[in-house]
Amino acid sequence: MFRKKAAFLLCALLYGGFALTAQEIKTLTILHSNDLQSRLLPSGPLQDFTAKQAGDDSTRGGFIRLATVLRELRARNPESTLVLDAGDVMMGTLFHTVARQRGTEYRLLSMLGYDAVTLGNHEFDFGPDGLSRILQSAAQEYPLPKIVAANLQFDTTATGDDRLEALAESGAIAPYVIIEKAGLRIGVFGLLGNGAVAVIRNGAPLSFADAKLTAKRIAGKLRYDEKVDLVICLSHSGIHKAPNSSAWTGEDIFLARQVPEIDVVISGHSHTALQEPILIDGTVVVQAGTEARHLGELKLDIIAGEARFNSWRLIDIDDRIVPDAQSVAEVNAAMKTVTDSLLAPLGYDFDQIICETDFDLRRRTADSNIGNLVTDAMRHGVAAVDSMPDIAIEALGSLRADILRGETGVQQVADLFRVVPLGIGLSDEQPGYPLVKIWLTASDIKKALEIITSVYPIRGSSYYLQLSGIRFRYNLNRVLFDRVIDFQLGDEENGYRDVDMDSPRLYSVVMTSYIASFFPVIARGTAGMLDIIARDAHGNPVQDLRDALIDADPGTPGVQELKQWRVFIEYLRSFPDTDGDGIANIPADYKAARGRIVALRSWDPRLLFRNAGLPMWGITAISFFALLGITAVAIAVYRKFLR
């Protein structure tokens, strides 16, 4: 455990009466990253990125730059430097689409000498077999860094995780590893947090033990059985600020408080770029943001065999850094593979220019211009091969990048793919979530909208929905799960029309297969209050989302999945060229959010009870009768007093 250095030095003087020499104090350096998410190239318009010179563009991050800094820092004292990653190495750019063939992300980790990494939820987006293929591809040229995953559990009867289990049996994946650095035995173990596990959709037949219980067991084993000097947890769980507070909370904060055997928590999942380390009862918690925009550097003093906090800093990864030749060569090779295997057959190129913009389109936990753009693209993309759906829904957590104007405003295929990059098919193994069309009643649409009003405040911004074809109002003064006042269907060009909430009519709704798969999760998490029933056009409940897939080419036998990323790119390419330079322009209508979500805070009875359901009426009735009871008791007490 860490103790205050001043207290130790005082004791040393009292009991030893000597000054510590420089030789008696060693320094262990821990370089750490998390949530790299296949960001091999910087964030920002790639048209602006200049790889061979510094100081001339505003792009940020990128593993191609982080590699330069990491190599330089590690070379200063390799015997006393530990390099670690807290998960989500994968998913977020075109590079992950060829990970099963090349394993570029893990190849780069190996090239840079990472000592240990853990698995994040996105490592399972291609399923257990896909992850095993990624790791095996990476290992063909470089030895893998040690992968630590303490709460990963294999299924002894199913076969879907057999290849990954074989890797674990070979030692490539283990609960923990013991590394010797700076004369210390250092125990490093990995965890996938309970919240991260909850958003995995392709993990079966794998399962995950409770993160906190696993941490107690493994940290205790390392400390007391293995007799290590230092225990480090690579935890893909996360931290965030408590509501209306400056205090930090989250699974990794609880971990630091409840498992005292842990000395250092290298956190991930929440994409938090800490400006200062969090010190909790002798445990240090650090996190380095996302997308290789930062590298964390933690220094520990090793005094008499014990580690004590020295310093921590967050290193910015930006245009001041010139990528080294080896990383550039690896990334260029991966770009060629992406173009040859994925893009060229579809008529695209990696750096092909699709459109330009005069303004930024950014994600925000509200109605957003980029959310409007993505969901409009989904409706129009479906209309190109099928009838126009009434509504399109996407979740903020599935939008992975902003569209930034940068220096020129030009947006390439690779830039736009980063906005909606996630997933894999239901009926194919091709990258990208497919779109599905389901039918909902007005009542179920209201329940879906309550995810914005009531689930997002509890579960986080990833659950905030973005919408097209619909606009609605909700009242924050109403009870949870019954805050929607009313909604209208239509669009800004043709106008909106009111909807009868009691009508049995079915409305068509398009979303990704990933979002549709969350309906049962939402129902369980709200005790059935938001039980949304996805139906087919005839009103029958959809049992298998593959039956709801939209066929991108009805003339070809079988179902050709309509991928979200492709309809997004095609929608942007369809915009008119308004400045005559031969490039489509994103319309000025998207400069700001279009007002599809309106939050009110009103005690007006009409807004409190319009289209109210059982939660609002029930709470009102309970409150009314409770007030009557209190009043009756008060009257009785008053009368007794008068006697």
Image (cartoon, helix red, strand yellow):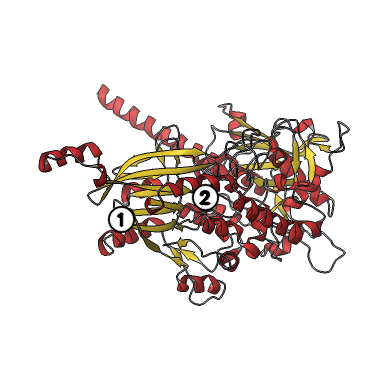
> Where on the picture, by quarter, is residue 227?
bottom left
Badge 1: residue crowd in 10 Å (few <14, some 14–19, many ≥20): some
Q: Is any part of residue 516 visible from this angle?
A: no
Badge 2: residue crowd in 10 Å (few <14, some 14–19, many ≥20): some
What element does badge 1 sit on?
Answer: strand
Q: At x 72% / y 45%, what residue is drawn?
A: 416
> Residue 455: image x %, image y %?
54, 44
- The foreground one among 135 and 487 is 135
> Residue 292: image x %, image y %?
55, 45
In the drawing, does residue 476 fall left or right of residue 402? left
Q: At x 51% / y 54%, what residue is drawn?
A: 112
Q: At x 57% / y 59%, what residue is drawn?
A: 107
Q: Is residue 179 above or below residue 621?
A: below
> Where on the picture, by quarter, is residue 218?
bottom left
* Three-letter amino acid code of the residue under disc 1: Leu
Please give the residue where the numbered disc 2 appears in the rendered image.
526
Extreme-bottom residue of the structure = 157
Q: Is residue 517 above or below residue 56?
A: below
- The foreground one among 468 and 119 is 119
> Residue 229: image x %, image y %?
28, 55
- The foreground one among 236 and 139 is 139
What element does badge 2 sit on?
Answer: loop
Looking at the image, tell me whether mark 1 or mark 2 is earlier in sequence order. Answer: 1
Which of the numbered marks, if any, corresponds to residue 184? 1
Quarter of the C terminus within the rendering: top left
